[in-house]
Amino acid sequence: MKVGKRIEISWMNQPGRLRSKMESYADGFIGSPAIAGIAAVAENRSQNPCIAENAVAIVRDAFAEGVAYGISDVLQDAIDEICSDVSDGTVSCSIATAAVLGDEVWVYSTGTCHAFMTDADSGGTGFKDVVDLSDKGIRYIRLKPGQSIILVTHGLRKLMGSSVSLNYTSLCGKPLSFCLSEMVRETRIKFRKKGGSAAAVRLCTGSPRVHLPWRRIVICFSAAVLAVALALLIFCRKSEENRADDQADSSLTVETVMPLE
């Protein structure tokens, strides 16, 4: 990955206010530029909420120890393992994943989970394109600055092609976790009642900005250093003034020698 670019990965789970037949889960792994990362969402119609969580865990754990090559093979093996776990036909599990290495991404989705790519057009001309990546096997994509991969469960499928997803994923000055949560927050009440999961991968240029908490820490630290320096300056001035007073007092003292009788 070239200097000046940074890849971001984020995920979130939105609990619903109503009991839903669909159980979902999102998770991932963020590695260094030399180690692949992963984001995944899954959902199922079973009464067992662990099925979706286990499916995501299989994908996450396959990459958590670090993968530097053969990423598509590792991803395929994880998918095969998930399919074998639910091969009895009584349970179906939908999943969408994005495996990342630098600016390279391998995307897979099936069932009711969806994957799509947004292009914010780093040239500043606004909306360019949204590409549906669902149900087409493992796809290889080399991201350009301003492009994002969005993974969603069924309740967020209408984000594909919407201005909401484009507007928030293009805000490279904001953390991706913030953009993802704001994107979900603006979805319809139906999703907020039933809940769901989402994840995203984004490529931006430049260095990330210092977030507000760190700015506060820097400001407080600078103020403390300034206060200490000011206190030392006042102390030194007082010490010099006291020395000057002592010298003035000693100059007024006259030594008198009395003759011996």
Image (cartoon, rainbow, N blue to C red):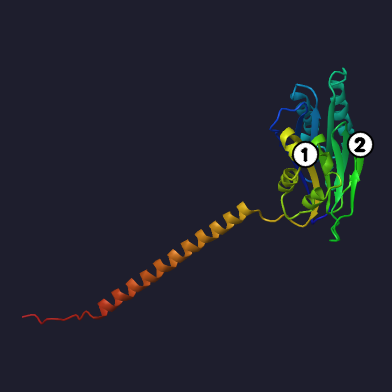
Give how far apart the Cα atoms at labels 1 and 2 are.
19 Å
Determine which of the numbered discs, if any, sits on residue 198 in the image. 1
Residue at the front extreme? 189
Which residue occupies 86% across, 47% down? 161
* Residue 116 position within the rendered picture, expressed as x and y whole percent measured from the top left: 87, 43
* Residue 65 position within the rendered picture, expressed as x and y whole percent measured from the top left: 77, 34
Q: In which quarter of the image is the C terminus?
A: bottom left
In the image, residue 82 sits, relative to residue 175, either above or below, namely above
Which of the two residues, 97 or 111, is positioned nearer the viewer here? 111
Mark 2: amino acid: Ile
Residue at the left extreme? 261
Left or right of residue 140: residue 207:
left
Residue at the right extreme? 136
Tell me if mark 1 has few (under 14), some (14-19) or many (20+) residues whose alpha carbon lies within 10 angstroms of its own.
many
Query: Does residue 139 show up?
Result: yes
Which mark sits nearer the N-terminus, 1 or 2?
A: 2
Which residue occupies 80% across, 27% down? 44
Residue 246 position by quadrant: bottom left
Residue identified by numbered label 2 = 138
* Residue 242 position within the rendered picture, expressed as x and y whole percent measured from the top left: 32, 71
- Element type at mark 1: strand
